[in-house]
Image: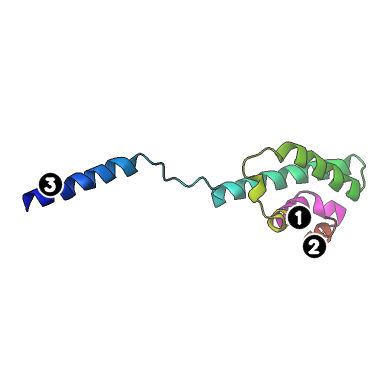
Amino acid sequence: MTQLRIGFFSIFCLFLFVFSSFDLKVNALPIKQTDVLLERIAKDFSNKFCNGVGFGLSQESAVSFAMKENMAIFKKKKGIENINTKDLAEKVSIAVVDKCGYPLNLSEDEFRQTF
């Protein structure tokens, strides 16, 4: 009976030793980190759009300019492929309306239609 206990205990220790060496962390991008990336993209886009309109670009040209610039900046960021485009469009439209929507007489729905 004691040999059986010692055998089970040694097998348990062996399994514990073997499986403790594996890294069981999930390599997925946390939701919070995705939200932070969404906020950064929306803020950067709204800055570029509002500055473009301020420099005399049409709203369509400013959208095009801001999209191209953001694509170049954020294309190599970790987790960019996990971003939901619908969420991104919503965040961007809110950021643009908050930053310069009043002088341009824009609402979120109107701006979202320009995408």
Q: Is residue 2 above or below residue 86?
A: above
Mark found first going from the N terminus, 1 or 3 = 3
Q: What residue type is labelled 2?
A: Asp
Instruction: Identify the element where label 3 is drawn.
Output: helix
Residue 37: horizontal and vertical position, in percent?
64, 45
Q: Which residue range is magenta in the image?
A: 90-106
Mark 1 nearby-residue class (10 Å; few <14, some 14–19, many ≥20): many
- Tell me whether circle 1 and circle 2 mark residues in contact (CB < 8 Å): yes
Indicate which disc residue 109 carries. Answer: 2
- Tell me whether circle 1 and circle 3 mark residues in contact (CB < 8 Å): no
Mark 2 nearby-residue class (10 Å; few <14, some 14–19, many ≥20): few
Q: Which amino acid does label 3 sit on?
A: Ile
Query: Looking at the image, how many numbered discs can be counted on the residues?
Result: 3
Indicate which disc residue 93 carries. Answer: 1
Q: Does 15 lie within the magenta span?
A: no
Q: Is residue 91 above or below residue 109?
A: above
Tell me, what colour scheme is on the image? Answer: rainbow
